[in-house]
Amino acid sequence: MDRSTFTRGLALTLFLSITALAAGCPGPEEVPPDAARPDRDAAVDAAIVADSGPGDAGTDAFSPDAFTFDAPGLDAYTEDAPSSDPDAFVCDDPTGCYRCTPTTSEQFLDRCTSASCEPFENTRARLPLLREDGTLPPLP
Amino acid sequence: MQTFPPRVDDTRPRSWPRVPRGRWLTSFSSLGLVLGAVLALGLASPSTGHAQVDCNTLPRTVIGVGGSASKPLLARLGATLAGLPDPTTLIYASPGACFGITPYVDGTPITGTANYWLPDGTEQTCRLPTAGLTPDFGMMGTAATLCSGVTALPAGIGDFAGPVTGWSVLVPTESSQTSISAEALYFIYGFGPSGGVSPWTEPGQIFGRNATSAALIALGLAIGVPADRFVCGLAGSGQPCLDVRSNGAMITALDTATNPEAAIGFVSSEVADASRAAVRTLAYQHTDQSCGYWPDSSATTFDKVNIRDGHYFLWSAYHFYVPVDGSGAISDPDTRRVIGYFTGETPATAAVPILDITIDNGTIPECAMQVWRDSDLGPLYSYAPTDPCTCYYENRATGSSACATCSDTSPCASGTCRRGYCEAY
């Protein structure tokens, strides 16, 4: 690992930690998630409520402006951020799974887990009738 | 009727959302004719070779009709009830899920034959009255209003939520395939072999059901193919997908497929679990999901963890459709007692351990779920049952649990002692 990579990683880790703490986020969910621990939802629900409150410090920390934070090594990460959704910034694992407590079907389906999975490539090579834009054609 | 225990902000009732009552429907003639024909021909429940008795001569009968997905679960309960000192005979005809509502909608009586079970689990066949009868309950893996021509429940019929079943997409064990996506299934069952999804492109190797099947309805909801748009039909219909007519027949069709690599079908996960020597469940990747998951944590386990925590999209809770009185209670006492085992109204006993019966069948009790949905294949939300049984479920289903054990003399360090395990609360 070269020095610049190390510095960038360190800065990114520091930034994520500060952001999570400031926002009152419970942090990434354990992997595997403890399915028998329903209080996790209450905890995160509370965090979400707190996060959405007016004037809440966490809300400020999660503002899109945070992504322009001028810290060494953050430029690349800012460019890679998938959207301006601050939750996505913290909760989307680099492997593609969702690290926080899910609240939507999509988040439940992609929540990080220790369960085995097997991807199916929805490409035109595998699905030749897919439209060029990847959408499905109408049924015949 | 049991109500859903609330999650933090959830006060939705456990009974299914009730559709408007007060009017009988008028356009069920075609479904009724099919039901009558199927049952009159005795196709609903083939004879097992024993001399058939009249169903109404059996002791203390409770007679149901509906889909074949739930037949193994009813068989287990039926055998248990038959072995009680004061036995109840649970009788079930399984011509298809949507026939679980038809008798109440258009008054079509059920005729032909049905099955019941001896205390040792042996399946028996009995004759229904020639004039037919109105069943005590209907049982379906999806809502009645998803059946063709059924837009509302008739007055006097209650909708009671039962345990959860998964729906499995299957290939023969000889197949090399391991996963499938909603998009791929859209092409396979909406277009047939011409959908071009390799290796499922060979006519005669795509197996399905008809629009009265809960498995088909559920899968269709997930993949965006309406039940009446599946390209499935009976042999000789010219349709590229063969309607095999029952969950059990699907296993046989896949097991005997002439080209196992090109063969594909679907059944309830309970039926799939009982047939793992013949068929293999594919990991299912729902729309926008990044990976495909099995109902269980892997292809070889039985923990149903991905259904219970929301990674596996293909599941629904069984519906019981039962005549009710003015207060919404099930009218017939014996039927109320039997259905009550599933809804929680009838307490489990050592003689009728309904939780064990349900888990052993591969069906998931509500108390082991961490997600729920208010409509079949609808959006998921976090769910906290009032009397959780996750630890008990895992131990019963897999033979082990990471939870601490407990008793009256050995309390939990944290959580609540339930059924011998320290549940989270």
Image (cartoon, grey):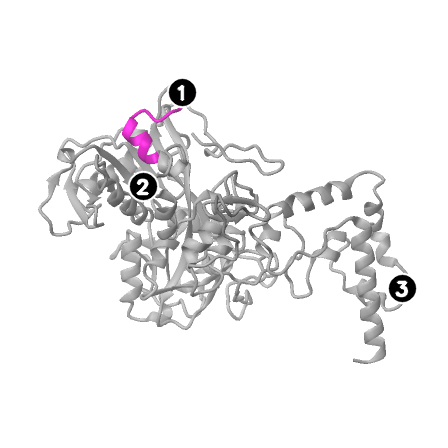
- Report if residue B5 is visible in the image: yes
Q: Quadrant of the C terminus of chain A?
A: bottom left
Contact flag, marks 2 and 1 (Cβ < 8 Å): no
Q: Position of residue B113 (x, y in %)?
A: 17, 42
Local secondary structure at mark 1:
loop
Evaluate whether label 1 is on the same chain as label 3.
no
Contact flag, marks 1 and 3 (Cβ < 8 Å): no
B321 or B300, nearer to the observer: B300
- Report if residue B224 is visible in the image: no
Which chain's residue wears label 3? Answer: A
Local secondary structure at mark 3:
loop
Q: Position of residue B53 (x, y in %)?
A: 11, 40
Local secondary structure at mark 2:
loop
Q: Determine which quarter of the picture holds residue A1.
A: bottom right
Contact flag, marks 3 and 2 (Cβ < 8 Å): no
Evaluate whether label 3 is on the same chain as label 2.
no
Asked if residue B367 is positioned above or below residue B172 in the image, the reply reads above
Instruction: Give the magenta-colored segment's residue range.
Output: B328-339
Residue plotted at (89% across, 67% down): A72
Q: Which residue is mark 2?
A: B352
> Residue flagged by tag 3: what amino acid is it?
Ala
- In the drawing, does residue A44 fall left or right of residue B160? right
Q: Residue furthest front?
A: B409
- Residue A71: image tag: 3
Residue plotted at (52% across, 38% down): B386
Q: Residue furthest bottom?
A: A2
Q: Which residue is mark 1?
A: B327
